[in-house]
Image (cartoon, rainbow, N blue to C red):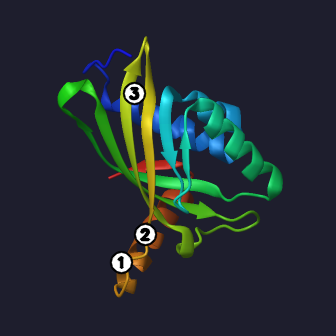
Amino acid sequence: MNIAPDLSAGDIVALYTRMLEAWNRRDADGFAALFAPNGSCVGFDGSQMNGRREIAAELSGVFASHPTAAYVAKVREVRHLDGGCALLRAVAGMVPPGKKEPNPAVNTIQGLLVVRDGDWPRIALLQNTPAAFHGRPQLGEQLTAELTEVLRAGKLVGQA
């Protein structure tokens, strides 16, 4: 895999948006295709999936077993790192089926490590961390309000 520094912030945000759109469509194969062949995904619950096949298989099971909530997100930062890869930092919430607001219990902090695979940017790592804010409920409330604003603006992904 050739890692190149020529990925624009727009390319990286577009990749992240396509990933969330694939999740919201419940498209396990489309989601996995956005990863580098040896890419990894760490789920909200700590589950680890490595490689496109495993990511697609695991998510197919998730999507088949129950209705999943839809993502709404806000990009906090896109930063180029040494070695030509890039980091996207975002916050995300999930809107349960039939609801119009994110469920604060599953807000997450996401990190995406992006590399170039041939002509395409690909995800090398997606890391989800619950936004629990232990002992600081006001931070959770602020995050939920921020994500609700993105949703009310009719967007999937907002930017800070």
Quick one: 22 or 155, which is closer to the camera?
22
Whether pointer 2 and pointer 1 mark residues with C-beta atoms closer than 8 Å, the reply is yes
Is residue 149 in sight in this rendering?
A: yes
Residue 109 placement: quadrant: bottom left
Dot 1: what SS? Answer: helix
The numbered dot on residue 139 is 1
The numbered dot on residue 131 is 2
* Residue 10 as seen in the image, left or right of residue 64: left
Q: Residue furthest left?
A: 82
x then y, percent, for residue 80: 23, 33
Name the amino acid, label 2: Ala
Name the amino acid, label 1: Leu
Whether pointer 2 and pointer 3 mark residues with C-beta atoms closer than 8 Å, the reply is no
Count of marks placed on residues: 3
For mark 2, does the 10 Å Cα neighbourhood hold few (<14), some (14 to 19), or many (20 or more) residues? many
Dot 2: what SS? Answer: loop
Mark 2 or 1, which is nearer the eye? 2
